[in-house]
Image: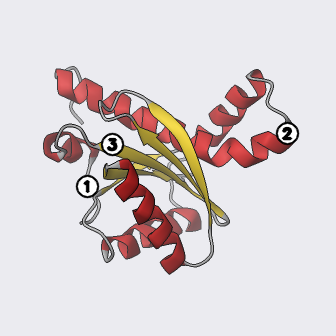
Amino acid sequence: MAIITIEELAARLPPHQAIAGLDLGTKTIGLSVSDLGRRFATPRYVIRRVKFGVDAQALLAIAEKEKVGAFVIGLPVNMDGTEGPRCQATRAFVRNMGEKTEIPFVLWDERLSTVAAERVLIEMDVSRRKRAERIDSAAASFILQGALDRLALLGRGDAPAG
């Protein structure tokens, strides 16, 4: 499977399957997983990146264990809306994953997700060292929660077109 839109995901995804949120970094992949009702994103794992094949295997093993029906991956768009090298790397990762799995991917604008995640961790009085360990999965949670909220709107028919 390749890249689909959030609207296509809303139409295709069967009930009782989780959605995984991914924050793809150069050294780690932050991972968050929804509940089966797709209401809440919960930070889960941080995968230490090794090389693509190993990373893909780890991700797919987690997807199988967690009953993941789709991935929402953060697309690191620049603040002015342009796409730079990190967007290209994310798109390449998704293309390569498409050769290994039928699980669809939704690209999600992740602007400010890491900033928001860090603010929440600071408000929770998480130490600097622990924040460094948790920031990627927390950012993945922000990415996924945004997509879950959009899916909920689409399901109710409240979402504006476009």
Residue 16 sits in which quadrant?
top left
How far apart, in angstroms, are the residues tagged by discs 3 and 1? 16 Å
Query: Percent x, y for residue 62?
Result: 44, 57
Q: Residue 88: percent from the left, percent from the top?
A: 49, 69
Q: How is the image coloured?
A: secondary structure
Give the residue at mark 2.
Answer: 128
- Amino acid found under the numbered disc labelled 2: Arg
**Residue drawn at point x = 46 percent, y = 34 percent:** 41
Q: Quadrant of the N terminus?
A: bottom left
User: Is residue 121 among the parts visible in the rendering?
Assistant: yes
Q: Which label is found at residue 4? A: 1
Could you tell whether 99 is left or right of 61 in the image? left
Q: Secondary structure at mark 3?
A: strand
Kind of residue at disc 3: Ala
Left or right, 156 with reference to 151: left
Structural crowding at the residue carrying mark 3, measured as other residues with C-alpha within 10 Å and reported as few (<14), some (14–19) or many (≥20): many
Amino acid type at circle 1 is Ile
